[in-house]
Image (cartoon, grey):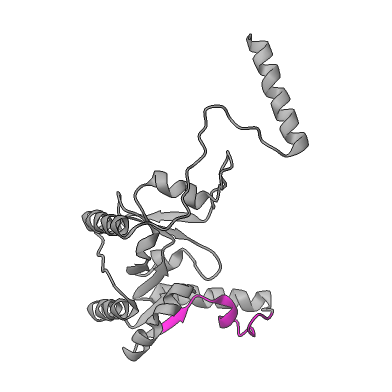
Amino acid sequence: MNDSETRGQILEEVRKALLTGEIAPIGGRQKPETSESPPSAEKIEALTGKFVEEAVLVGGLVHRAADAEEARNHLKGIIEKCKAKLVVRWDDPLLAELGLDDVMKKAGVEVITENLRVLADAEEGGYAPPEKIEEARAFVKQKLAQADLGITGAQYAIAETGTLVLSTGEGRGRAVSALPPVHVAVVKAENLVSSMGELLPLASGSQGRDIPTMESCLYFITGPSRTGDIELEL
């Protein structure tokens, strides 16, 4: 097949795809393998150990918790160590489920949950005027600039690099992990993956399609920020 014939075949495939909305399989591309079965206890333990090792190497600090009570105790220790007075946290079901707010409030810490609708005084499931949402967003930004601690969840964690994988959205702003001097991320052990290669099929939502659709709001954190301030101090 010469160059002209090859070009014609490619253009014909493009024309068909535009007409039908379907993309033909690309030769040689393997579909990502996904497993719906939960990881074994042995695999979770191995991944956890590896993640802890790698996260410490890049400057992170990892606390393992067997249950919600132990997680709350770890948070209490972090608050005391940081002498935190103001905390901004994601509006995340896991954080609420663990009862972290009770620990912070008992310690005399002001807690701001990044729930713009609640902060805009909208009724549950009700409409919040845009101007109220903007006021709530400005309020959160102001608190973030003053916060001692930012608490988020983490959708996944990559064991081989000690990397946290966060997915932003309403109530889950990136600034919560970036602005406060201390960032605490809570991740379930079963959401650990071994590598980026294992993560991509899970995060892409490809479901066996030839071309996955990765979320644009996914971002990665590997250790504390190494950005210097205006005086070049980390």
Q: In this view, does 36 lie to the left or right of 26?
A: left
Of residues 180 and 17, the one nearer the viewer is 17
Q: Is residue 92 left or right of residue 212?
A: left
Q: Give the range drawn in magenta.
A: 111-126
| Place of residue 201 in the rendered image (x, y in percent of width and height, measured from the top left) | 48, 47
Q: Quadrant of the C terminus?
A: bottom left
Q: In this view, does 96 lie above or below 15?
A: below
Whether residue 227 can be seen here = no
Q: Residue at x 70, y 17 (%)?
A: 8
User: For residue 60, what is the image quadrant?
Assistant: bottom left
Q: Is residue 176 above or below residue 207?
A: below
Q: In which quarter of the image is the N terminus?
A: top right
Whether residue 129 can be seen here = yes
Q: Is residue 34 left or right of residue 27?
A: left
**Residue 169 magenta:** no
| Place of residue 144 in the rendered image (x, y in percent of width and height, measured from the top left) | 43, 73
Q: Is residue 61 above or below residue 54?
A: below
| Place of residue 76 in the rendered image (x, y in percent of width and height, measured from the top left) | 28, 81
Q: Residue furthest right?
A: 19
Of residues 135 and 90, the one nearer the viewer is 90
| Place of residue 167 in the rendered image (x, y in percent of width and height, measured from the top left) | 48, 60
Q: In this view, does 3 lie above or below 26?
A: above
